[in-house]
Amino acid sequence: VYASCFEHGVTPESIVSNEPVSIPDGDHIWSPGNFEGEAAGGVRTIRAALQYSVNLCAVHAILEITNVRDVVTMAKRLGIRSNIPPYPSIALGSAEVSPLELTSAYSTFANEGVRATPYAVVRVEDRNGKVLYRAHPEFDNVLEPRICHMMTSALSDVVNAGTAVRIRSLGFHFPAAGKTGTTQSFADAWFIGYTPQFTAGVWVGFDDKRIGFTGADGQGGRAAAPIWGLFMKSVYEELRPPLEYFTTSYSNVASPQFP
């Protein structure tokens, strides 16, 4: 949603409404709300909306800054192959996708707009070392680097001081960016995150939609993000990659405001 917003000319410093909204849906009215403890009303910057996962801001963003069609197109450009229904509720995750799809999509932000098709087998050799098969990954430029720089800048705040801040308390201090996700009744908890070298995704839930948590422990920031943090801490301790930093500079031009 927000990557599509950035293509429509806003920046992380632009504002978006946090007011209650009701949308006709056939014979019903869809009235989404913010997560527990997050008050409605006023406006937020896009940066803050992402940092604290403000539901109403995401809904207003898809209605007033971008549009449903462009958000669906953005998802497809990033590599999502699952069906995404063209409804405003996709702003809050009403479309079901696989962990592989979502993780691959976020890697495009880390790659500064280059989408890489994921693959599992690097090569196959016979017992004599002759290569019988070698993977040839596909790469496509699908986003301007500037859009990715804005996404990374905002998503870094999610890790450093937002809904995924527990990653830092667990001892992982390398540059990182990502997003938490929580579905209704805490059925699913998500965190997809990336560093300059690696992208990884964590989903906690059941295939049959059972509820695995009670209360706030089922939030993406509590159930999934800590797993990601411990995993990445282990990866960096084992591989010891060189310290790299994200490019998060972008032209902070005067942006349209959406009260």
Image: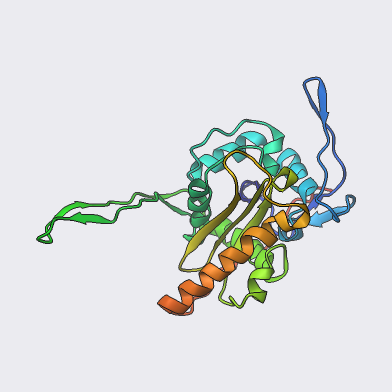
Residue 4: where, in percent of width, then height? 62, 46
Question: Where, by quadrant of the figure, is residue 174 drawn?
Answer: bottom right
Q: Extreme left residue here? A: 128
Can see residue 150? no
Residue 158: where, in percent of width, then height? 68, 64
Q: Residue at x 47, y 79 (%)?
A: 237
In front of the other: 245 or 214: 214
Residue 23: where, in percent of width, then height? 81, 31
Residue 12: where, in percent of width, then height? 70, 59
Question: Relative to residue 211, is residue 22 drawn left or right?
Answer: right
Residue 158 lies, with reference to residue 99, above or below; the image says below
Count of all numbered marks drawn on residues in the image: 0
Question: Relative to residue 36, is residue 84 drawn left or right?
Answer: left
Residue 112 lies, with reference to residue 27, above or below; the image says below
Q: Residue at x 75, y 50 (%)?
A: 256
Can see residue 225? yes
Q: Residue at x 69, y 69 (%)?
A: 165
In front of the other: 141 or 203: 203
Question: Where, by quadrant of the figure, is residue 13 drawn?
Answer: bottom right
**Colour convention:** rainbow
